Amino acid sequence: MRSLLFIVARSLRQHLLSTIITVISAGLASGLVMSVFTVSEQSRTAFTGGDIGYDAVLGAKGSQLQLVLNTVFHLETSPGNIPWSLYQEVKGRGDVRYAIPYALGDNLYGYRIVGTTREIFDVFEFQNGEKFRFQGDGQPFDEGFQEAVLGSVVAEKLGLKRGDTFRPYHGLQYMPGSAPHQELYKITGVLEPTNTANDGVIWIPIEGIFRMDGHKLAGGTEEVERGAAIPDEWKEVSAVMLKYSSPIRGKFMQDEIRRGDSATLAWPIASVLGTFFLKIGWITKVLVYVAYLVVVVAGFGLLASIYNTMNERRREFAILRALGARKQTVFSAIVLEASAIALLGSLLGYLIYGGILFGSAMIIREQTGVVLDVTSVHPSLLWTPLGMVVVGALAGVIPAIKAYSTDVARTLA
Amino acid sequence: MPLLELRDVRRAFRSPDGEDQLILDVPSFEVEGGQQVAIAGTSGSGKTTFLNIIAGLLAPTSGEVVWDGDVVSGMGEAKRDAWRARELGYVFQTFNLLGGYTALENVTLGMMFGPGPDRAFATSLLERLGLADRLRHRPAQLSIGQQQRVALARALANRPRLVLADEPTGNLDPRFALEALGLLRELCREQGAALICVSHDPRVLDDFGDALDFAVLNRAMAEEPQGS
């Protein structure tokens, strides 16, 4: 065994450039496979993990998924609005612990501004048992003033802090060059990071959305005059986040809502997202197949790399045989060398995997606010390197057979 | 009992036109333990084939190579490999050093297939051969004469009982040829190893004094001149 390791180590050193290139290729393949499995699994878990602190989302007639993406992850556009009266109705139900309105229409440099009530800070749980907490001496907004509370990512990215002011921009997307609304909002606090999509949101009083300069109410027909009271029938919300006294109550409400024709209840949220991931599961499959293909290509690359050196190394093998090395020793040396390259590649693969995972986690956090658990260990972290070593060993077999069958006397002649 | 004995050893090769050509036909050849034998032969006379058959690198078409009472050609391949590593040292005409290994590694590598690596002994051999400051040099960084001495050290590293030398001075400057030969013979004597040295270099043959004529040893040469 010692002689084998000695021969392999010297060979790797002697063909250093080809070794490095092949190791990188194997590392990329290994890292890619581990990343695809881990990122897809982590994304699915993070988005459907069910650790959301409320049970259902009530919104306009349309897609449940769109409702969930809109309110839970603050993605997508709202499917429409529901009347204030419906919000008041569900809020007053005995089986509803809390109902928090969610109104959209503005942004600050791309960060979504959500109009809501103070309940978002007082009773709302963004995760089970977890309420928003303020950084430092931050405070919730006062519903009667133009005040705002910033998610931690918004504050960090825009460099805003308590006491600063800003003017919202109309729409959910920031259009460079567009003029902001006239209203000036004062920041009363910045929330502690929650590692959820809520970190990328700016919360303001719902009245602020209704009264924002240029906003039309009552189905886009009425605009509120400054200082005037807003009739309830003009008011609309994009969605209502609901927490029941018992989660199963969502089933009863869903049946009631379905009988009507004006709203949709997304319930249970995890199930809605699970369906979504089932629908886009083919993307993961395609990525997995691509990753496997990369492994196969890396395997062939390894084979070609070793095979190409065989002619120059045939004499080396003949010398080893003349010195007393057994045929099996030469065969094993080649297979071991290929396996060692694959193993080194797998070790490099962990670095590449780490890079891809952290990169993906950052992008996903930036885009959605959702944080992947980069410390979780997917089984692919074990079987991918093992599989890579097996692929490497198999790639070494053909060159090894060639070395095994070297005619010593003729080669040394 | 002789250390090495060849009995009616023949070796034929198939020619491109499909006919078997007899290259080697040695009815009898013996070497005693510690004996030093020089064999004179011209290039292409089958001397290397003769040595390769003794070393078990090439199987005879017929006949037997007997080592200390055991028929080498009757051993299994693995046993023959182990026997070669343990009992034989081989100095090739072109040295056949491994380019990716240092001088010391070239010597210890052969030991790995035999009794096991002994860096101290390998180092002492190389020092003895004047390569104390070249241990970590690779063959390409050594002169031809230095490469030859590394090859000598490698052949002797396992304390073999027989050393085969194929034109050991063929690639050497005349100034160093006799020096290298002297070292080889001296080290073989010190280790008690027998030596078979084939060469067409008159200086080598003169040094031995009583060289065997390969043309007499190999009856195939009498019938038809052949290439090795």
Image: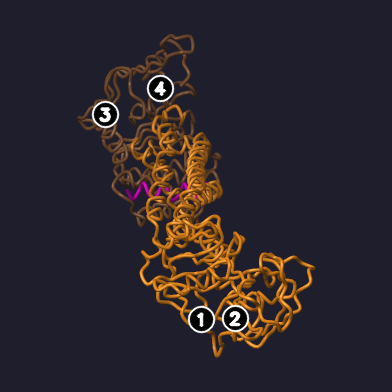
Specify whether residue A387 is painted magenta: no
Q: How far separated are the C-alphas under marks 1 and 4?
A: 104 Å
Residue A2 lies within the magenta run? yes
Q: Which residue is outermost to the bottom?
A: A137
Helix, strand or loop for disc 2 = strand
Q: In the rendered image of this protein, which colour is used for chain A? A: orange
In this rendering, the label closer to the viewer, 4 or 2: 2
Residue at mark 3: B72
Q: Sequence order check: which comes first, mark 4 or mark 3? A: 3
In the picture of the structure, the residue carrying the numbered disc 4 is B214
The chain to which mark 4 is attached is B
| Residue A214 coordinates in the image, percent (x, y) | 75, 72
Q: Which residues are magenta?
A: A1-15
Are circles 1 and 2 on residues that touch, CB within 8 Å?
yes
Subunit bearing disc 3: B
Question: Nearer the observer, disc 4 or disc 3?
Answer: 3
Crowding around mark 1 (Cα neighbors within 10 Å: few <14, some 14 to 19, many 20+) is many
Q: Quadrant of the N terminus of chain B?
A: top left
Relative to the observer, which residue lies in front, A367 or B9? A367
- In the structure shown, which secondary structural element does the residue marked by tag 1 occupy? helix
Residue at the spot of label 1: A121
The disc label shown at residue A149, or none: 2
User: Residue B169, image x and y in percent?
Assistant: 49, 37
